[in-house]
Image (tube, helix red, strand yellow):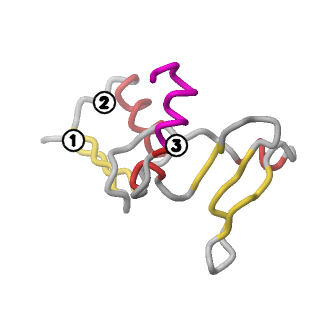
Amino acid sequence: MNERMVIVGAGQAGLQIAESLRAEGFGGAIELLAGEKLPPYQRPPLSKAWLQGDLTATGWAHDGTIEVCEDPTAPFVLGVQWHPEELPDPRIFDAFVAASTGAR
């Protein structure tokens, strides 16, 4: 019998569950179900910083959903709900990559 694990959600918790299953020796298939087109990736846990007051909301969707959070003491946005790499003008994303990696 083939073991299979289905994890609903490919966010921080879902990815951690998958990694923990492998680390504990689970050898069956692991399937992550998510609504995003991108593969699972580690997302920074921003909620703690938000609750501590270290982040400022600076962008909202039409329905009032916070779309952008910034650290007022840092030069770049920490968390966004949108994908700047998909914008028609990639300069903001290129600048972020250059600043965070030293690449030019």
Residue 71 occupies quadrant: top right
Q: Nearer the viewer, residue 55 or 26?
A: 55
Q: In the rendered image of this protein, does residue 7 appear above or below residue 96?
A: below
Q: Residue at x 38, y 32 (%)?
A: 21
Image side of residue 1 versus residue 82, left or right: left
Cα–Cα span, label 2 and label 1:
9 Å
Quarter containing the C terminus: top left
| Location of residue 4 in the rendering, given as x and y in whole percent from the top left corner | 24, 45
> Quick one: which residue is furthest to the top in this view?
102
Cα–Cα span, label 1 and label 3:
23 Å
Residue that numbered label 3 is attached to: 12
Q: In the rendered image of this protein, does residue 19 appear above or below residue 48?
A: above
The residue tagged with tag 2: helix, strand or loop? loop
Closer to the chain start, of discs 3 and 2, is: 3
Q: Residue at x 28, y 47 (%)?
A: 31
| Location of residue 23 in the rendering, given as x and y in whole percent from the top left corner | 39, 23
Q: Amino acid at mark 3?
A: Gln
| Location of residue 90 in the rendering, given as x and y in whole percent from the top left corner | 43, 47
Chief secondary structure of the magenta portion: helix
Residue that numbered label 1 is attached to: 3
Image side of residue 37 versus residue 90, left or right: left
**Which residues fall within the magenta stretch?**
92-104
Q: Within 10 Å of the Cα at label 3, are there few (<14), some (14-19), or many (20+) other Cα atoms?
A: some
Q: In the rendered structure, are the residues bearing label 2 and label 1 in contact, judged by CB atoms less than 8 Å apart?
A: yes
Residue that numbered label 2 is attached to: 26
Quarter containing the N terminus: top left
Cα–Cα span, label 3 and label 2:
19 Å
Residue 65 is one of the magenta-drawn residues: no
The residue tagged with tag 1: helix, strand or loop? loop
